[in-house]
Image (cartoon, rainbow, N blue to C red):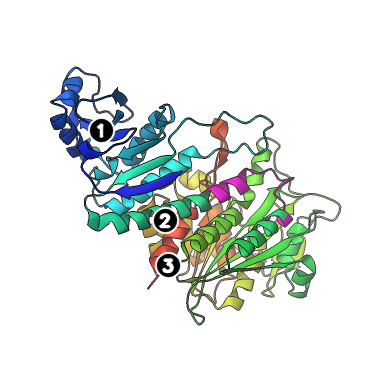
């Protein structure tokens, strides 16, 4: 879809569809009042009759309004002005999108960017519009023999800015929005693919595709033999039960100065998680194809950063494997040695994500990182604690955590901090090794992060548990692409710092 920005009066816009907001109770926006004046009260008359109250979710299409150059006017309900916030703006955009999908118009001009949302400028509103429209337009039908009919929706959306001075701001907002949306869509596609297609080798191929597409990206893929030389016993213990070879994928984006320390993103890439010998229940096990959504978010973020050509250095690391039961699979009670030299008693083979991440985090030291952020669908416990709205964040560096939380609020991809106190470390004690890989029923999301913390003492680190946010279950089952927006916003915020 094509997005543009323009500055102009609504009554002068020659367009197939002019989009205007109406708030409660029956109150025209500034653009609406301008159209009402030129049309000799056409809009206000319709509103007085009760055809449009202004509630969120309401839309009304008008044709051939007197005195205007637009073929249609789409009135969109915006609710009460005092209640306007980021969430309601998203609902307003969703109702606009739904109405446009059922119109014959191929292009539209929107004045919804004029809506006043406290603390949000026109740049935010334009970028949020792009992200919302692209998210709602997404569909995954690659593997269906019969595709849905092509949408009749618009192909071009022009958004208004207050004056010509904001044109460059709006254009940059569109670039950011489209780049982030492209990364989100990539992450959603990868998450939605089944495990028999999206294997560790397939993830490696997607990383190599970025290498070929963007000159600033350099990809390296390590094989199991390379991991053995690096003594990655924890990662290899998870791969032991599968015939699919594990991969350690590294993507380096060189956009900053050569001596600039990179931001390192580490994404869990378990392309299918059966639980291993500690087999999961059969119900909803198909959703364990989403256990690589951390890896997908790293690929999506690298794609977004490269598209924007941001002047910063970023490294993406993906440990990729399957976790399956077999005669060669790791057994509960087995003890392995991680790349760091620390030994781990594996009490539950379904706590495998931390095992592949710990070796990848140790491997991240070679890049002399400025900060390291790992992203993982790590624990069901985080869903019990927080539900499916925010992702959890924990770490060893408060400024990094605070920056991530702030960026999550900025782009509506929210985080909630959970404690990572030393008291929880006692739950990981083992009689036979340096640590166990689980800490019991209590504080499962926290003890998983405590495990990772033992491998991150040499750098500033944050851990994102996205088990509740990486995909939607039920009728609308599918990957969300989170937290690509958050990660990209964080990297954007770091440019020039």
Left or right: 374, with 76 as reference point: right
SS for dot 1: loop
Q: Which residue is mark 1?
A: 69
SS at badge 3: helix
Q: Which mark is residue 459?
A: none
Give the position of the C terminus as an image quadrant: bottom left
Q: Residues within 10 Å of mark 1 (few under 14, many from 20)?
A: some
Look at 55% across and 67% down and name the residue there: 453
Q: Nearer the viewer, residue 234 or 44?
A: 44
Q: What is the spatial separation of the Cα atoms under label 2 and label 3, in whole angstroms?
A: 26 Å
**Horizontal and vertical percent position of residue 9:** 20, 42
Residue 92 vertical position relative to residue 347 in the rendered view, above or below: above
Residue 372 image offset from top left, x and y in percent: 52, 69
- Look at the image and tell me whether residue 437 can be seen: no
Count residues near mark 3 (Cα–Cα under 10 Å), then give few for <14, some for 14-19, many for 20+: some
Task: Give the vertical position of 13 relative to 418 (above or below).
Answer: above
Q: Residue at x 49, y 62 (%)?
A: 305
Which residue is identified by label 3? 400
Give the percent coordinates (x, y) of residue 274: 72, 46
Which dot, 2 or 1, sits closer to the camera? 1
Badges 2 and 1: C-beta atoms under 8 Å apart? no
User: Is residue 354 shown in magenta?
Assistant: no
Residue linked to disc 2: 175
Q: For the view shown, which residue lies furthest in the top direction? A: 49
Give the residue displayed 44% in from the left and 56% down from the top: 486
Asked if residue 48 is positioned above or below residue 324 in the image, the reply reads: above
Number of residues whose C-alpha sits closer than 10 Å to that of mark 2, classed few (under 14), some (14–19) or many (20 or more)? some
Q: Earlier in the sequence, mark 2 or mark 1?
A: 1
Q: Which residues are magenta?
A: 185-201
């Amino acid at each position: 879809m094509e997005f543009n920005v323009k500055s102009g009066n609504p009554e002068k816009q020659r367009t197939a569809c002019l989009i205007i907001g109406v708030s409660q109770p029956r109150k025209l926006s500034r653009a609406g009042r301008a159209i009402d004046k030129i049309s000799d009260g056409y809009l206000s008359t319709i509103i007085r009759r009760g055809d449009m109250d202004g509630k969120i979710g309401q839309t009304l299409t008008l044709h051939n309004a007197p005195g205007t150059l637009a073929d249609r006017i789409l009135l969109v309900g915006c609710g009460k002005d005092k209640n306007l916030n980021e969430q309601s703006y998203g609902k307003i955009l969703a109702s606009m999108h739904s109405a446009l999908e059922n119109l014959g118009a191929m292009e539209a001009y929107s004045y919804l960017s004029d809506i006043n949302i406290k603390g949000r400028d026109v740049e935010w509103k334009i970028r949020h519009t792009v992200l919302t429209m692209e998210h709602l337009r997404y569909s995954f039908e690659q593997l269906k023999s019969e595709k849905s009919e092509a949408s009749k929706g618009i192909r071009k959306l022009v958004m208004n800015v207050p004056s010509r001075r904001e044109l460059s701001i709006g254009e940059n907002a569109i670039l950011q929005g489209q780049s982030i949306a492209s990364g989100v869509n990539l992450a959603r596609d990868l998450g939605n693919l089944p495990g028999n297609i999206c294997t560790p080798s397939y993830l490696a191929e997607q990383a190599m595709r970025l290498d070929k597409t963007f000159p600033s990206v350099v990809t390296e893929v390590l094989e199991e033999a390379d991991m053995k030389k690096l003594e990655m016993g924890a990662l290899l213990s998870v791969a032991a039960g599968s015939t699919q070879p594990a991969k350690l994928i590294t993507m380096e984006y060189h956009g900053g100065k050569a001596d600039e320390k990179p931001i390192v993103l580490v994404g869990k890439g378990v392309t299918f998680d059966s639980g291993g010998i500690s087999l999961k229940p059969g119900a909803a096990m198909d959703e364990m194809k989403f256990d690589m959504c951390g890896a997908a978010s790293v690929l999506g973020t690298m794609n977004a950063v490269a598209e924007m050509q941001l002047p910063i250095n970023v490294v993406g690391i993906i440990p990729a494997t399957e976790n399956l039961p077999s005669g060669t699979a790791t057994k509960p009670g087995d003890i392995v040695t991680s790349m760091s030299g620390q030994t781990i008693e594996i009490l539950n083979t379904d706590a495998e994500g931390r095992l592949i991440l710990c070796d990848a985090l140790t491997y991240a030291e070679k890049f002399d990182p400025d900060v390291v952020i790992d992203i993982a669908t790590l624990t069901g416990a985080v869903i019990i604690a927080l539900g499916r709205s925010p992702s959890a964040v924990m770490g060893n560096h408060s400024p990094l955590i605070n920056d991530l939380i702030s960026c999550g609020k900025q782009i509506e991809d929210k985080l909630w901090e959970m404690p990572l106190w030393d008291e929880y470390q006692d739950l990981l004690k083992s009689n036979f090794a340096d640590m166990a890989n689980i800490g019991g029923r209590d504080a499962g999301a926290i003890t998983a992060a405590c495990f990772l913390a033992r491998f991150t003492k040499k750098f500033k680190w944050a851990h994102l548990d996205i088990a509740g946010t990486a995909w939607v279950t039920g009728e609308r089952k599918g990957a969300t692409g989170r937290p690509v927006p958050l990660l990209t916003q964080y990297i954007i915020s770091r440019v020039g710092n």
